[in-house]
Image: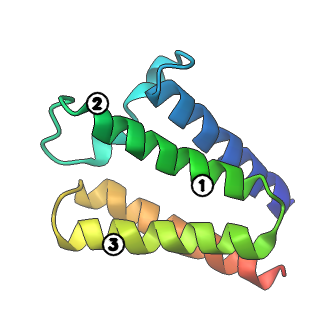
Amino acid sequence: MLMNIFFINGIYDILCSCSMLKIINIPILNDLHLSMIRNYKKNNILFERFFAYWIFTYGVMRISKNNVIISYSYLIEAIFFFNEYVNKSVDGRKTLFVISTSLLLSYVSYLSV
């Protein structure tokens, strides 16, 4: 059951990144992650591509079925979003949700090793 959640989340991340990279067109996913960034004016294509590559990397890690790698992927995501939260570069409410769910999923994944 848990592996299915991680796998689906990995597929979601891959679809989001491919949508951000304009490889596929899923309008709701195009700007979903970018909407977390405060005052972003969609004027830095290189930043958007690197952000998409980062999301793609997490997706691949989460479909790996390796619980330690999956756990670390969520932990890293939580740490980096916490840093951006502290620096006030991201929407607080959305980011706290991502941090909380990432920490929970990291813990649950690690427990099932």
Residue of label 3: 82
Q: Pointer 1: residues within 10 angstroms few (<14), some, or many (20+)?
A: many
Asked if residue 43 lies left or right of residue 27, the reply is: left
Indicate which disc, 3 or 2, sits on the residue closer to the N terminus.
2
Three-letter amino acid code of the residue under disc 3: Phe
Which label number is shown at residue 25? none
Asked if residue 10 lies left or right of residue 50, the reply is: right
Q: Which residue is drawn at the image coordinates 62% and 74% (left, top)?
A: 72
| Quadrant placement of the C terminus | bottom right
* Residue 18 screen position, x and y as percent: 55, 29
87 relative to 32, above or below? below
Tag 2 near tag 1, CB within 8 Å: no
Residue of label 1: 58
* Residue 1 screen position, x and y as percent: 87, 59
Q: Pointer 3: residues within 10 angstroms few (<14), some, or many (20+)?
A: some
Which quadrant holds residue 79?
bottom left
Which quadrant holds residue 88?
bottom left
